[in-house]
Image (cartoon, grey):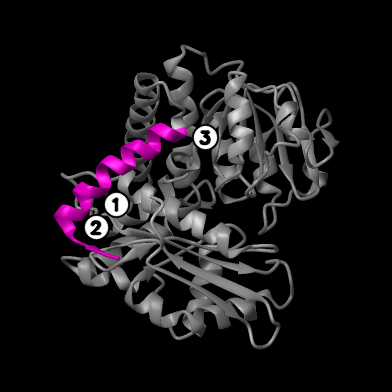
Amino acid sequence: MTTPPFMSLTWTDHVTGRRGFLVVDRLVRGVSSGGLRMRPGCTLDEVAGLARGMTMKEALHYDPEGRYVPLGGAKGGIDCDPRDPEAYDVLVRYLRATRPYIENFWTTGEDLGLSQDLIDRAAAEAGLVSTIQAVYPLLDDEETARRRLTDAFAVRVDGIGLDELVGGCGVAESVLTALDRVGAPYAGTRVAVQGLGTMGGATARFLARAGLTIVAVADIKGTIANPAGLDVESLLAARDAHGTIDRSALGPDDREGPADAWLAGEADVLVPAAVSYAIDTTNHHRVTARLIVEAANMPVLPAAEELLTARGVTVLPDVVVNSGTNAWWWWTLFGDIGPTSDEAFAHTRRSMRALVDLMLTRAETDGTTPRAAAHAIAADRLPTIADRFGLHR
């Protein structure tokens, strides 16, 4: 997994001077998969790490009996605040510049700072047919497959798009699987979530509906906490497009605190679902939870994870935990599931539970961390995928 990527490039916007990045870690059957993020401070190294993670996510969801064809891993990133008035035009110019790659071997979609609707609108303006058109030649029936995915994206559940829910469903199932393995009851288990955007919001909803207590959520304005439990549905309804909560929706017993207060509150489970590098060597000691579930990409720095592991904190890695959204796209497009919420949630729960259980069993057997176990499983599967489908590097 340490071999150089297939391709790495840096783009500079000729209008604003802002930079964007694209890293294709690996191609399988000539195609790669990985989202496009936009955040201030985004770097090439960050995007390269995420691209490597996507290679593993694809491998971890490989099912030799499934229709879903594993792809290689890739990632795009733009160093820009998505709230900046110029952000949309920067996005359009980035997509226009990377159009040849998207048309031929990079399939992409929403990630941190960018919604799928926004990417689709910008992609059309940039002259793209679709941000996943590179995979179309691999489909048995392109027209049917594209209609199935379009139908799936049109599904809404309690006012929220299915595409915004499946990832959080996978994160929640990761939490529940870990609790089940140690016999911990859902009732009374306290959860703090950093970020109430697409991934964090859906995770909070699924965990609350499973009977867990969401005691804290954090957004860009700060942390909202209530030891007795927050009204998750009210907070979700009060979000703006960037996941920021309107404080007028807070309950009478809800309390506001600093943005980093979610980290050190009295919670059993932490779900960092917002930004990378949220837990590092300067703040890991504040964590009192025994389980950290990485809904965001790379939220726990390696050195911090070592220190957390040494004192008995389990970290479920992003490469497994937040892989549900990517897998759902391909399960739907290739026809492993139909375009309904029932099929999407059932398949996501079944697949994520099996994968998390396999990872934790491997970690126990090998005497390693869940992350090391996930990497080992991916490393075992990559040669099989390459032998079956061919590999372009």
**Which residue is rendered at x = 50% and y = 54% of the image?**
49
Q: Is residue 379 on the magenta stretch?
A: yes
Which quadrant of the rendered structure holds the C terminus?
Answer: bottom left
Q: Is residue 331 left or right of residue 317?
A: left
Against 367, is 270 above or below? below
- The kind of secondary structure element at disc 3 is helix
Residue to which mark 1 is pinned: 331
Between discs 3 and 1, the one toward the N terminus: 3
Residue 279 pos. (x, y %): 67, 38
Residue to which mark 2 is pinned: 334
Residue to which mark 3 is pinned: 206
Q: CA distance from mark 3 to mark 1?
A: 21 Å
Question: Disc 2 marks which amino acid?
Answer: Phe
**Which residue is rendered at x = 32% and y = 34% of the image?**
350
Residue 118 pos. (x, y %): 56, 70
Residue 173 visible? The answer is no
Against 229, is 35 above or below? below
**Which residue is rendered at x = 78% and y = 36% of the image?**
224
